[in-house]
Image: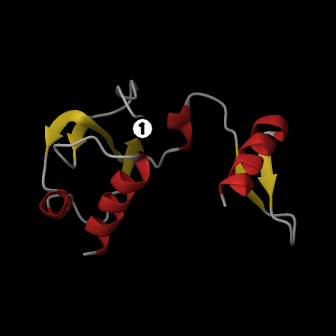
């Protein structure tokens, strides 16, 4: 539920990590900058934005090299664009603004096919 999600986000901001109820596993953790130190070496870094180059995500995914890691930046913003210095390319998966969950769903579905 949204109430549980909001509670988890508050816990994340206060304690800087969320642990599993049933054990010592860490589920979410706030990391220090630069975020690029946590990304796989040699990964292609792709940003998503309505203002990016419009692509058919299902066809675009097939052009990616096999076995090479890919990192996506999903802004989940109603307006504007996430500004990062590590993106190599910025694409748009729709000609319309999308919520973060819909954009993430489109990208995941394209990789599943």
How many numbered markers are drawn? 1
Where is residue 75 shown, x and y percent of the image?
A: 42, 38
Where is residue 54 shown, x and y percent of the image?
A: 13, 43
Picture quadrant of residue 48: top left
Which sits in the foreground, 78 or 22? 78
Q: Residue at x 78, y 52 (%)?
A: 18
Left or right of 51? Residue 43 is: right
Where is residue 78 shown, x and y percent of the image?
A: 39, 34
Q: What color scheme is it?
A: secondary structure
Q: Residue at x 39, y 48 (%)?
A: 71
Q: Vertical placement of 16 versus 67: above or below? A: above
Q: Residue furthest bottom?
A: 113
Badge 1: residue crowd in 10 Å (few <14, some 14–19, many ≥20): some
Q: Which residue is tagged 1?
A: 75
Left or right of 59? Residue 22 is: right
Picture quadrant of residue 112: bottom left
Quarter of the image where the N terminus is located: bottom right
Which sits in the foreground, 61 or 44? 61
Q: Residue at x 14, y 38 (%)?
A: 53
Left or right of 82? Residue 2 is: right
Residue 78 visible: yes
Left or right of 25? Residue 36 is: left
Q: Vertical placement of 43 versus 52: above or below? A: below
Quarter of the image where the C terminus is located: bottom left
Residue 42 visible: no
Where is residue 110 shown, x and y percent of the image?
A: 26, 66
């Amino acid at each position: 539920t949204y109430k549980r999600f909001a509670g988890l986000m508050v816990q994340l901001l206060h304690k800087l990590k969320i642990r599993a109820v049933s054990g010592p596993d860490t589920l979410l953790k706030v990391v220090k900058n630069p975020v690029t130190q946590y990304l796989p070496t040699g990964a292609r870094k792709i940003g998503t934005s309505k203002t990016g180059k419009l692509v058919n995500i299902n066809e675009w995914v097939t052009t990616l090299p096999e076995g090479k890691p890919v990192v996506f930046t999903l802004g989940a913003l109603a307006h504007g664009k996430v500004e990062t210095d590590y993106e190599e390319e910025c694409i748009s998966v729709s000609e319309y603004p999308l919520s973060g969950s819909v954009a993430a769903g489109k990208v995941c579905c394209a990789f599943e096919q």
